[in-house]
Image (cartoon, helix red, strand yellow):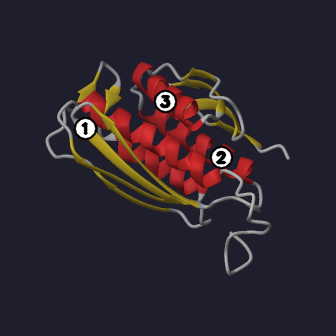
Amino acid sequence: MTRTGRAERTTKETSVAVEIDLDGHGNVDVSTGVGFYDHMLDQLGRHGLFDLTVKTDGDLHIDSHHTIEDTSLALGAAFREALGDKRGIVRFANASVPLDESLAHVTVDLSGRPYLVHSEPDGMAPMIGADYDTTMTRHILESFVAQAQVALHVHVPYGRNAHHIVECQFKALARALRHASEIDPRQTGIPSTKGAL
């Protein structure tokens, strides 16, 4: 069974192509033009053991918002396609990942219903580098959830460095998505009393 997904999104603001293999080895080839976001997508692929290719050409002469948003939407759509009918998957998973002084807790349900709960420490630095607005982290997750159709809870109870606060979220997300999407050898059907997800 091949569990791969591809999504393309083209607007007047961006052109995005995303490919993902859920059963990969963490091979990542990402280029969005937003350095820190590329770094976070690299974390997602490597720690999720997803083979991930992302190519985005966006209107960075304005700012990075459209580029990050549209890439996240396409990533969610590709992930949903790769899951297929979700037959045999674990479905639920959680992961906690520290990064020095910061800690992220992520819980996911590949439910077919988009829902996000997200919290970070107050008073974060507004920017990481020159082009990553730290308020975009929640919007990345909102966009991904909307297209992937998953329920996602992300909680960072404490942290000081903005880079660490954001990065531990992506690492924990990678681990949770990896475990939730894995095939359970004892699960022969779709893991829902409804018979569909």
Q: Say what amino acid the circle numbered 2 marks.
A: Phe
Picture coordinates of residue 166 (x, y %)?
A: 33, 36
Q: Residues within 10 Å of mark 2 (few under 14, many from 20)?
A: many
Does 160 sit above or below residue 143?
A: above
**For residue 36, what is the image quadrant?**
top left
**Residue 43, numbered circle:** 3
Which residue bears the numbered disc 2? 79
Which element type, helix, strand or loop, lies under badge 2?
helix
- Residue at 65% over, 24% down: 27
Q: Residue at x 43, y 43 (%)?
A: 172
Q: CA distance from mark 1 to mark 2?
A: 27 Å
Q: Which one is closest to the eye, mark 1 or mark 2?
A: 1
Q: Earlier in the sequence, mark 1 or mark 3?
A: 3
Mark 1 or mark 2: name the one nearer the start of the chain: 2
Callout 1 amino acid:
Ser
Q: Is residue 126 left or right of residue 46?
A: left
Circle 3: element type: helix
Q: Residue at x 51, y 43 (%)?
A: 175
Which residue is disc 1 drawn over? 102
